[in-house]
Amino acid sequence: MKPRLDYHVHPGYSIDAEDYSILAYCQQALNLGLKEICFTPHLEVDPVRRQLDWFVRVKGKLHPMEDLSWLDCYFHDIEEARSQLNSRELKIKAGLEVGYERGCEEKIEKILKNYPFDFVLGSVHCLEHQSISSWQESRRYFSSHNAEEVCGKYFQVLKEAVQSNLFDCIGHLDLYRRHGETILGTTLKTAHKGMIEPIFREMAHRNMGLEVNTSSLRRGLAEFHPSRDILLQAQECGIKIFTVGSDAHRLCELGAHTGEALLLLEEMGLTVYTFTSRQPCPV
């Protein structure tokens, strides 16, 4: 079994997470026997959703996301945790989860160039400016689209995210299953076919990774994001880099089901990677 790790963790900086510090997560990681943790606070850039999403939490208070001083605080907290723990037992990485939005590439690139991230996860959280990770918003969105339309729009945005070449890895691919299966049924499980393969080939060409996100299990789904079928397609299309993340938004979710995900990848003959200064390294 590979060493346990978690490469998708939301500390209190993410406003949809509980307000736990980076140090608290690191102490919990040690309690759980994790060997590596990568923090991925949200960065959202869609100007249409500015009043909804463009905030972080700093020292318990809401802070405008576009005021990037919060990132200085974030990196200070990372260094403080490394210094306080001073432990070879846990590697602590500074990552970021970017909610990709077309037309915002230059803004994202400027931020990524100005800070020393270890790992940048690119995710599609919204379609037509509506959050597909939110039950309230996705319920409205999925009720007015069929499975083929949802996947068509999702994979078009994902294609552009990959082509931007801004990201080290793509997060929770097939996120539309989280709430979409409840409304659109099992047709969503196969609607990706014919759309996803060229994207995977582009990812392989760019040496871009694919995350196995375990949050789906605690939300009642039977498989990870993405499903085993999609992982097989990724393998066939030449993707070599895989990461594992719980998408924890509270302490009790840290590391959840990551051991199972690591075992699945091992059984499939797929290699798990970690990142340092945005350079991938096989575990």
Image (cartoon, rainbow, N blue to C red):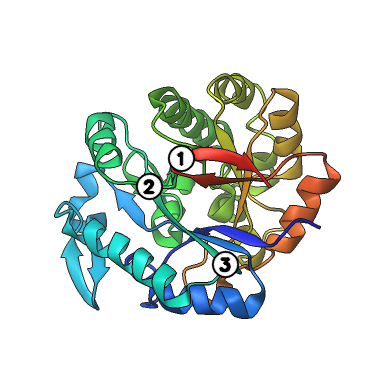
> CA gap, disc 2 to disc 1?
7 Å
> CA gap, disc 3 to disc 2?
18 Å
Query: Which labelled disc corresponds to residue 124?
Result: none
Badges 3 and 1: C-beta atoms under 8 Å apart? no
The crowd level at tag 3 (other Cα within 10 Å; few <14, some 14-19, many 20+) is: some
Compared with 172, 100 (above or below) is: above
SS at mark 2 in the image: loop
- Residue at 59% from the left image edge and 19% from the top image edge: 198
Q: How many marks?
A: 3
| Residue for badge 1 | 278
Residue 151 coordinates in the image, percent (x, y) = 54, 33
Residue 44 coordinates in the image, percent (x, y) = 30, 49
Q: Is residue 187 left or right of residue 120?
A: right
Q: Nearer the viewer, mark 3 or mark 2?
A: 3
SS at mark 3 in the image: loop
The image quadrant of residue 252 is bottom right
Q: Earlier in the sequence, mark 3 or mark 2?
A: 3
> CA gap, disc 3 to disc 1?
18 Å
| Residue for badge 2 | 117
Badges 2 and 1: C-beta atoms under 8 Å apart? yes
- Residue at 68% from the left image edge and 62% from the top image edge: 4
**Which quadrant: the N terminus?**
bottom right
- Residue at 38% from the left image edge and 47% from the top image edge: 117
Query: Which labelled disc corresponds to residue 90?
Result: 3
Look at label 3 and name its amino acid. Answer: Leu
- Residue at 51% from the left image edge and 28% from the top image edge: 152
Residue 67 coordinates in the image, percent (x, y) = 14, 55
Look at label 2 and name its amino acid. Answer: Phe
Look at label 1 and name its amino acid. Answer: Arg
